[in-house]
Image: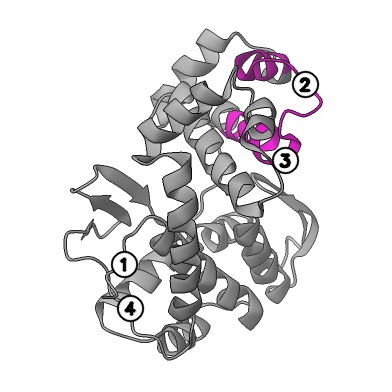
Amino acid sequence: MLCHCCSKLLKQVFENKDIRVLAIKPGFVELEYDETQISVDEINLLIQAQGMEVIKSKEEKIVEKIKRSVIELIHESNNINSILRKSDYLVEKLAMSYQQMSKIFSKYEQITLERYIILHKIERIKELIDTDEFTLSEIAYMMDYSSVQYLSNQFKKETGMTVSEYKKKRIKNKIALDELTKKNKFMKLKSNIAISENGFMFDPYTGDSYNLNSTGVEIIKHLKAGKTNEEILAELKRKYDADDLILEQNLYDFITMLSHYELLDNE
C-alpha cells in the first residue's frame, strides 16, 4: 500500500466496520478494534479486498521500507536538504549495505532497485516540470543530477522524448484530461493493451507493464464494457463500501494515469 488515495480508501473501509484507525500512512497502518467482534484474519481479508496485501516476512518488510524511503526522498524532500547520493541515503535509512538491499529488492520485485529509483526520479521530474515553478537547473539539483545534460539524457532515454517535447505534449494532455473526466465521457483502451485476470496490464508496443489493484481491475472491466465515467462510478459505489468522494478521486486518478501513459484511445 503506497499511494495516499489507497490510504484514504482503506481508512474509510476500516471506519465503516467500526475499526478505529490510530495511524495510517503509505505502507503502515495501526488499528484499534474489538477482538470479540472482528478477527485479524477478517481484517486481512478487508485489506486484500482493496487489492492490497499484508507484509509478513522480514525481507518483504525491508522491501516495503525501501520503497517508502525512496518515495520519501524523491517525492517529498526533493533532496533539497541533502547532498547525499540516493544509495547513501538508503544505506543510512535502513542500516544495510546497498548491495544487500538491491539483492532483497530484486528477489521480490520485477525490476532492480536502481531502476525503481530512476523511474521515481523521472516521474518526480515530470511533476516538477508541470508546476512551472523551477528551472531545469534547479530540478537537476533537487533530483541529485550532476548536470542538466545528464538529467536531459536520462529523461529522453526513459520517456522517449526531450524535456521540451514533454512540455509541449503536457499542454495537449491537460486539455484532453479535462475532456476525459466529464461524467458522460465514453473512453476505451487502446486495442493493443493486454490485461490478465489477476490485474497485470501490458502494452506490447512500448513493453511497459502495470500491476493494477482491485479498483483498477474493476474500472478496466467497465471501460471494456463501453461504460461512461458516470456509469463506472455508479458501479464502484455499488461494489465498494467507501465514501463517494474517495471513489470519485480514485476514478479520476486512474483515468489520469491511463491518459498520462497514453493507454486510452479516444480519437
Task: State yes or no: discs 1 and 4 in contact (Cβ < 8 Å).
Answer: yes
Q: Decide: few, some or many residues near mark 3? Use Cα within 10 Å; few <14, some 14-19, many ≥20.
A: few
The residue to which callout 1 is attached is: 264
Q: Is residue 69 magenta?
A: yes
**Circle number at residue 108:** none
Q: Which element carries disc 1, helix, strand or loop? A: loop
3D distance between C-alphas at marks 4 and 3: 33 Å
Quadrant in the picture for residue 89: top right
3D distance between C-alphas at marks 4 and 2: 44 Å
Residue for point 34% across, 59% down: 262
Looking at numbered disc 3 in the image, what kind of residue is underneath it?
Answer: Glu
Question: Does residue 189 sit above or below 163 in this rendering?
Answer: below
Residue 131: x and y, percent?
66, 53
Question: Does residue 135 sit above or below 182 in this rendering?
Answer: above
Q: Earlier in the sequence, mark 2 or mark 3?
A: 3
The residue to which callout 4 is attached is: 187
Horizontal placement of 167 versus 190: left or right? Answer: right
Q: Is residue 187 magenta?
A: no
Looking at numbered disc 1 in the image, what kind of residue is underneath it?
Answer: Leu
Q: Decide: few, some or many residues near mark 1? Use Cα within 10 Å; few <14, some 14-19, many ≥20.
A: some
Q: Earlier in the sequence, mark 1 or mark 4?
A: 4
Residue for point 66% across, 47% down: 26
Task: Specify start and end residues of the magenta stretch as a single range.
Answer: 64-92
**Circle number at residue 76:** 3
